[in-house]
Amino acid sequence: MKQYRHRLLYIILAIAPVLAYAQEPVKPMADTVAFKTGLEKFSKATNSIQSDFIQEKKLKMLNDKVTSKGLLYFKKENKLRWEYSEPFSYIIALNNGKVMLKDEGKVSSYDANANKLFLELNDILITCINGNIFQSKKFSFRFMESEKYNAAELTPVNSAMKNFINKIILYFDKTDFTVAKVEMFEPSQNSTTILFRNKKLNADIPEKYFILN
Amino acid sequence: MTQIGRIESKLIIFNHYKLYHLRSAFIGLFFSFYFCSCTPKMFRDLKSAEGVFTKEKTQLFRPGLKESLVYKTVIKYKEREFSSLTYFNELNDSVFKIVLLTTFGNTLLEAEISRNSFNVNNVISYLNRKPILNLFEKDWRLLLAGNFNLEIPKLYADKQGETIFNFGTNRRNGLYYYSSEKNALTKIELYKGQSVRTVVAVDSIQDSQPANFSIEHPTLHLKMNFSLLKKVSNETIE
């Protein structure tokens, strides 16, 4: 009986990584050069992106999920606008390094200390669309792929960043090289997944979207 | 030893004995006077609320939560204002979990609180300071006193439609305002001496749980507003 129990344990241990990655890239990327070249081409051809997003935060301690929804706008070189509509109306705009925030119609201050992960994510998204993400010295990179996605796993190099992030996985749509999904894993074992849908490339996005007053 | 010597030694023992008792009595009197004088007049000679009190009258959060309560939390400190999210759930009727997140979803603080313990499971470095964590614990203990306290409070006042209960000892007193019309707790005031240190105002109730409430620390210029959010349906995310 004991022997069978051990065998069962070995089987579980053997298939665990496969189960964990069941929905995710399961093999190392075959051609990273082609992927990077494709991303560079996409970056050169893209001036703006507009997309719906669904964000899901998994809280290990409460065994609960936090779901938010909204719209994301990006305009070259480094303008971003996160417009949350659910669970409440909230806008964060980044314009050439300046962070602005509008909470239910009221412009308020932004706590950069509390939002290091958020600022890091914005930096990653901007550098990603601008095509220079893989030149970053902040992360080590691992490339994977599945049928639908090319994926880059970013692991922080410096210890300060490791305090608030374990790793970030960016999933790129194989058809158009846009970011389809982002997964962020915190040391607390909480994680955040952001799914981008209905992407519009090179739409005309007014400048005022990135100025909050 | 002569007889005089024996009498003298007995007298010395007696005097020592008397002195010891006198000293004890004096110390006892001093402390009872001290504590009596420390308890503000408004909280002295209150009677037990036995007969009027039921546990739910002092409970801000009613037991039996099926899922977490999510509050948009706006923190106002002096001129500055920040938004965040507070998740609150019960593990059982005497252990509660609180998670504080940024609006984006970064974890700021995860804590577990019960009658006898307060454990911080995870906290962002810049909030990991004793005064901040102490204040956080004290605030949640104030909110959950009705859930934690096993003893019957004292009755502060019993006016028409409003009963005020007092949990406290000497200089720290918490007043819990129960409205019979709303069948809910409407206000909590924490006193240190005679001055109000913390005010919890409950503006609305939804399904027996607080929907809108605030915690104010007038002396610290700090106010936190909590508004219950409707959870976004659990849409499947790839």
Image (spheres, coloured by chain):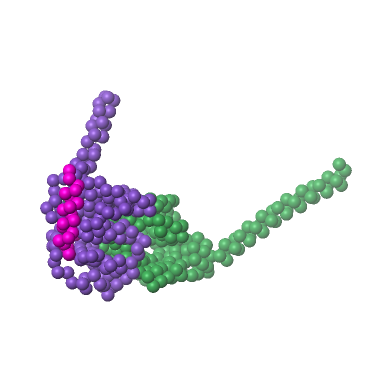
Chain colours: A purple, B green
- In the picture shown, does residue B69 fall above or below A99? above
Residue sitting at x 25%, y 26%: A4
Task: State the extent of the magenta-drawn residues as a range.
Answer: A30-53
Residue B175: image location, x then y, percent: 43, 65
Residue B9: image location, x then y, percent: 81, 47
Residue sitting at x 16%, y 53%: A38
Q: Looking at the figure, which quarter contains the N terminus of chain A?
A: top left
Residue A101: image location, x then y, percent: 29, 68
Residue B27 counted in the magenta span: no
Q: Is residue A3 left or right of residue A150?
A: right
- In the picture shown, does residue A165 fall above or below B173? above
Residue B14: image location, x then y, percent: 76, 50
Q: Looking at the figure, which quarter contains the C terminus of chain A?
A: bottom left
Q: Is residue A72 left or right of residue B204?
A: left
Q: Residue furthest left?
A: A175
Q: Is residue A66 visible?
A: no
Q: Residue furthest bottom?
A: A213
Occupied quadrant, residue A195: bottom left
